[in-house]
Image (cartoon, coloured by chain):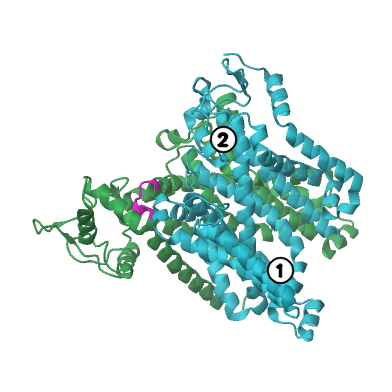
Amino acid sequence: METLGIFGIIAGLLYRLWPVWAALIVILVVVRVYGSRLGLFGQLFDSAIGTAGVMICGFWVFTAIFANIIAPLDPRVQVTIMKNAVPGAVDTQTGMAFLLGGDQLARDVFSRVVYGARIVLTIAPAATLIALLVGSSLGLPAGFFGRRIDSVLSFLANLVLAFPVILLFYLLVTPGIMETAIPYAMAGILFIIPIIFFCVLFVTRYSARPALMWTYLALTVVIGFWIYSGLVFNADPLGIISIEPNELNIFVAVVFASSPGVFRIVRGLVMDIITRDYVAAAQTRGESPWYIMLWEILPNARGPLIVDVCLRIGYTTILLGTLGFFGLGMGPESPDWGTAIKDGSKVAQLRLFPWQGVVPAIALMSLVLGLNLLADALREESLKD
Amino acid sequence: MLSFLLRRLGVMLLTMLCLSLVVFFFVNLEPNLKKLAIFQTESRATEQELNNWLERNGYRDNFFIRYGRWIGIAPKQPVRDPSTGQIVPRFRYCDEPTKATFSGVLQGDFGCSTAFRTTVNKKLPAALAATGILMFWVMLIMVPTALVIGVLAGMREGSKLDRSLSVASIASTATPEYVSGVIFTAIFATWLGVLNGSAATALTRGFSFYNFTLPVMTLAIYGIGYIARMTRASMAEVMTAQYIRTARLKGLTFRAVVMRHALRNALIAPFTVIMLQFPWLLTGVVVVESMFNYKGFGYLLVQAAANNDIDLVLSCGLISVVIVLVTQLISDIGYAYLNPRIRVA
C-alpha cells in the first residue's frame, strides 16, 4: 500500500480544510478593515491570546459548518483494506488518501474527527445556553430575595454539585433509564424554564405597551413550544427538530450537571449588583422585582457571564467527552470525539495504532484550549474598563 | 465556632441523606431490578418467574423500608425458599443471617456484589487503599508544582514569565484526563517506550517508576493548571496590597517580600481550591483507573455500574458522596481558620 510522506499529509490537510482557511481569512480581513468599530469582538484581536482564542474557536466552528465539504468520506463508511491504516495511506483502488489513518473498523479518522466537531459544537453550546437560562432563572430570585428562597435553592444546587459527575452520568445516562419516564420528566422541567424566562422578560418590559407585549409573548410561546415538542416529546409537527432518545438523555444530563454552577455565579453576581444605586433608583420608581432582576441586574452581570459561558462550553465539551469515553449515551457508531478516544485508548490499540486515539484527543484539547483562551482574553478586556 | 461546626455537620448529614436516597432510587429503578432478576435466575425465565424472584427477595417491598434496610434502621428479613421452606441467602456467594437483623451500612454491612460474587466488604477496602496510594502521589506532585507555578506567575503580574506560565496553565486546564492519558501514553509508552502504558502490574508486582508514572502524571496535569491559576490570582492580589508596598519601601529585597510577607497570605485561597479539587479528582480517578487498568475504587465503580451490581454501586456512590462532603467541610473550616478576616459566629 502506498503512503504519503509527512509533507504529503500536511499538504493534503491544508487542501481539504480550504473552506475553513477562507472563512478565517475573511474574518481577519474584516477585523483589519473595521477594527475598533466591531466593539468587543474587534478588541479581542488586540492581544495575542485573544487572537489565538478566536482563531482556534473559529477553526472548529467552520470545520463543523463545512464538515460535508471538508470530509472526504462519510464518517460511517468502512473501506475494508484501510483497517488500521497508517496516516497518509492511499487506497489503491480509488486513489483516495486516509490523511490521518484508518481506525479499527476501517473508517477514515480525519472524516470522523471533522464530523465529530459537528456533534460537539451543536450539543455543547446548546446545552450551555439552556444551563445558562436555567441557572439565571433560579439564581436571580435566590440572590434578589434571599432568605427562604435562597436557602432552599442553594441547598438544591449544592446537592447536585456534591454529586460526583461520573456517578451522576452513570445513574442518568444508562440504557435502562430510557425505558422509564425520568429523562422526559427532567427534560420537560428543564426546557420549560427558558420559555417561562422569556415570557417574564417580555411581560415585565412591555406591560405598558400591550400590543408589543402580546406579539412577543405569542412569538415566544409558539417558537418555544415548537422546539419543546420537538425536544421533549420528539413530536415536532413540522418534523424539523428531532432528537434521538439517547441524545436527549445526554443533553439533559449535561444541562442538569452544569446548571447549578451557573446558579451559583448568578446568585453571587446579583448579591453584588443589588447594592448599586441604579437598583435603588429602580426600586424607588416602583418597578416590580422581576423587572429589576431581568432588566437592571442581568444586563449589568453580562461581563462575568460571557466569560463563564466561554469556559462552560469548554467544560461541557469535556463532559461530553467523558460520556463518550465511558460509552454512555452516544451510539457506538457515533463519530463524536469522546467515543473515538475511548476506542483508540485501549492499551493494545494505543500501542500499535496511536493515531486513532491521539487525533480526536488533540481535537478536543485544542477546542477547549481555544475556548479557555477566549475566556481569558474576554476577562482581560472586561477588567480594562 | 462550635455552633458553626454543628450547623455545617447538620447540613452535611441532610445532604448525605438526600443524595443517598437519590442514588438508592436510581439504582433500584425497574429496568435495573429486572436485569438483576434475569441475571440471577440464569435461565429464560418468564415475566412471572422474574416477578416471583423479586418478590421473594424483598425487592417489591416498600421503597422506604428497603432504603431503611440498606441503611440499617429496618431489619433485614431472611429469605425462605418456597419449595423447601429452608432459609437461603439471596445470593449464593454471600452469607446472610438466618434471623431478622439490623444489618445495613450503619452496622458496616455494605451488601453483596453480584459482579464479583463476594461481599462488598471484601472488595472495597483493597480498592480504596489502591486509590489512596494513587491520590497520595498525585497530591504530592500536583500541589507543590501548582503552587510554585502560581506564585512565580503572580509575583510579577504581566511579566513575560507570568504570560507564559499562564498560557501553560490554561493549556493544562484544557486537557482532561482522557486526553492527556492518550497523548502521554502515545509519547512515553508507544513512541519512546520509557514508561508502561498499563498500571495493572503496580498492584500485583509492586509500584515502580515504570508502571506508575503515567497514571499519576495524567491525573495531576488537569488539576495543576486550575490550582496554579487560583494561586496566581490570589498572589497577584496580595502583591498589590498596601503592606507589600510598605515592605518594599522599607528597603526589603523583592525576594524577602515575596517569601516572608506575600506567600503566607497568598496561600489561603488555594487551600480551599485544593480541597475542592477532590470531587474533580474523583472523576479523574475513574477515567485514569479504567484507562490504565489500575484496580482501584474508580475501576470498581465502572465495573459495578456496567454490570448492574446494585449494592456495589450504592456503596461506591455513598463513599464518593462522603468524600466530597467531608472535603467541602474541611475546606470551609480551614478557610475560616486560616483567614483572620472571617469570623465565625
**Given the image, on which type of amino acid does mark 2 rest?**
Val
Q: Which mark is residue A293?
A: none
Give the answer, above or below, for where A110 lies relative to B321. above
Q: Which chain is green?
A: B
Q: How crowded is the residue under tag 2: few (<14 C-alpha within 10 Å), some, or many (20+)?
A: many
Q: Are marks 2 and 1 on the same chain?
A: no
| Residue bounds of the magenta highlight | B306-313
Quadrant into which the C terminus of chain A falls: bottom right
Q: Front-most of B135 and B304?
A: B304
Q: Is residue A384 left or right of residue B131?
A: right
Magenta stretch, main secondary structure class: helix
Residue at 78% across, 54% down: A378
The quadrant in which residue B68 appears is: bottom left
The residue that mark 2 highlights is B182
The percent position of residue A346, horizontal first and vertical second, equals 48, 33
The quadrant in which residue A299 appears is: bottom right
Residue at 50% across, 49% down: A244
User: Is residue A191 among the parts visible in the rendering?
Assistant: yes
Give the answer, above or below, for where A102 lies relative to A186. above
Residue at 61% across, 63% down: A224
**Given the image, on which type of amino acid does mark 1 rest?**
Leu
The residue that mark 1 highlights is A269
Q: Front-most of A248 and B154?
A: A248
Q: Which chain is cyan?
A: A
